[in-house]
Image (cartoon, rainbow, N blue to C red):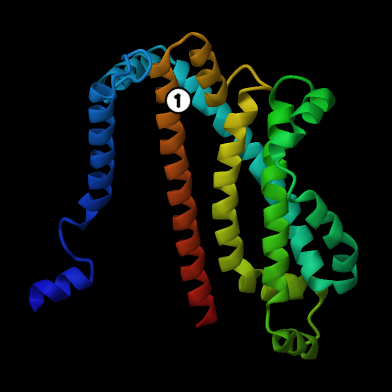
């Protein structure tokens, strides 16, 4: 019973190995496919070949430079989207008249893929960081607006009546009532949108810029270096995993702080 209870509580000393086991199985399947698929190593390089080429790219600074460029664009675009989208979502959630006016426009623009904006972004902003940042902004802005609006609209109306009885100002209502109430939903939305941003920046860098992981993959494909292509793909996956874990930890910190405040 003691062993079963320990496993049920997740206290097994081997629990931390489970995610690594999944990656090990993936690498094993990759190695077997590269060896027995019939494709040449130039077309489908194995894990060892990709690891060696990744060490080369890290040693000469190429991989680090392109990764930093991609992270820079995602950071700027994502923060712009959060800084504008969340306040707009709060305003739309609080004001039904404004929501009736703006929501149809948002629902019209939201389904348009950010990649469809690439030709216009290149005409408006030229080549470089601005078009990529603009596309990342679009990919994050609309989901954050919609998620925040829904979160605010779902707050129990009784809370607003209590705030009115205490003569809360608009600023106090937003900072002491609305923001604490919507933190969990907003954190979830941020977690989803940062992943979308990371997807979009790679696609944008294949067209609009001369640096970044997307450009690295495109340039490696043109040079027929499939090992470099896979290096870029591996780094994209690792950074995406790191961003997701970062947002999960942020969400847990916010939940703990909100739990302490509520008690």
**Which percent across, then down, holds residue 207?**
66, 22
Q: Is 73 left or right of 20, judged from the image as shown?
A: right
Front in this rendered view, residue 80 or 115: 115
Q: Is 96 left or right of 157, judged from the image as shown?
A: right
Front in this rendered view, residue 214 or 9: 214
The residue positioned 48% from the left and 45% from the top of the image is 243
Instruction: Kindly tell me whether residue 175 is visible in this rendering.
Output: no
Q: Is 155 left or right of 215, judged from the image as shown?
A: right
Q: Is 44 left or right of 115, judged from the image as shown?
A: left
The residue positioned 49% from the left and 8% from the top of the image is 223
Where 192 falls versus 99 (above or below)?
Answer: above
**Which percent across, then down, holds residue 220?**
49, 14
- The furthest residue to the top: 223
> What secondary structure is marked by label 1?
helix
Where 138 falls versus 207 (above or below)?
Answer: below
Quadrant housing the N terminus: bottom left
Quadrant in which residue 219 is drawn: top right
Where 149 falls versus 177 (above or below)?
Answer: above
**Which percent across, then down, holds residue 183?**
60, 67
Label 1 sits on residue = 232
Front in this rendered view, residue 60 or 210: 210
**Which percent across, then down, holds residue 206?**
61, 23
Instruction: Kindly tell me whether residue 5 is visible in this rendering.
Output: yes
Front in this rendered view, residue 10 or 49: 49
């Amino acid at each position: 019973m003691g062993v079963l209870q320990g496993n049920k509580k997740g206290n097994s000393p081997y629990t931390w190995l489970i995610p690594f086991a999944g990656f090990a199985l993936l690498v094993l399947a990759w190695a077997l496919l590269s060896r027995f698929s019939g494709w040449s190593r130039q077309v489908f390089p194995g894990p060892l070949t990709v690891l060696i080429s990744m060490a080369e790219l890290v040693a000469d600074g190429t991989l680090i430079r392109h990764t930093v460029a991609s992270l820079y664009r995602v950071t700027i675009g994502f923060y712009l989207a959060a800084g504008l989208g969340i306040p707009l979502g709060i305003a739309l959630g609080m004001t039904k008249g404004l929501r009736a006016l703006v929501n149809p426009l948002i629902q019209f623009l939201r389904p348009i893929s950010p990649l469809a904006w690439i030709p216009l972004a290149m005409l408006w902003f030229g080549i470089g960081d601005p078009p990529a940042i603009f596309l990342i902004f679009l990919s994050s802005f609309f989901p954050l607006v919609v998620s925040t609006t829904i979160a605010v609209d779902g707050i129990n109306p009784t809370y607003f009546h209590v705030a009115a009885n205490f003569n809360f100002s608009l600023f106090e209502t937003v900072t002491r009532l609305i923001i604490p109430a919507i933190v969990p939903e907003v954190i979830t939305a941020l977690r989803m949108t940062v992943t979308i941003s990371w997807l979009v920046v790679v696609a944008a860098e294949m067209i609009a810029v001369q640096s970044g992981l997307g450009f690295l993959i495109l340039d490696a494909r043109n040079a027929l270096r499939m090992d470099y292509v896979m290096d870029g793909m591996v780094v994209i996956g690792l950074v995406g995993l790191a961003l997701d874990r970062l947002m999960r930890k942020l969400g847990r910190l916010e939940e703990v702080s909100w739990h302490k405040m509520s008690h």
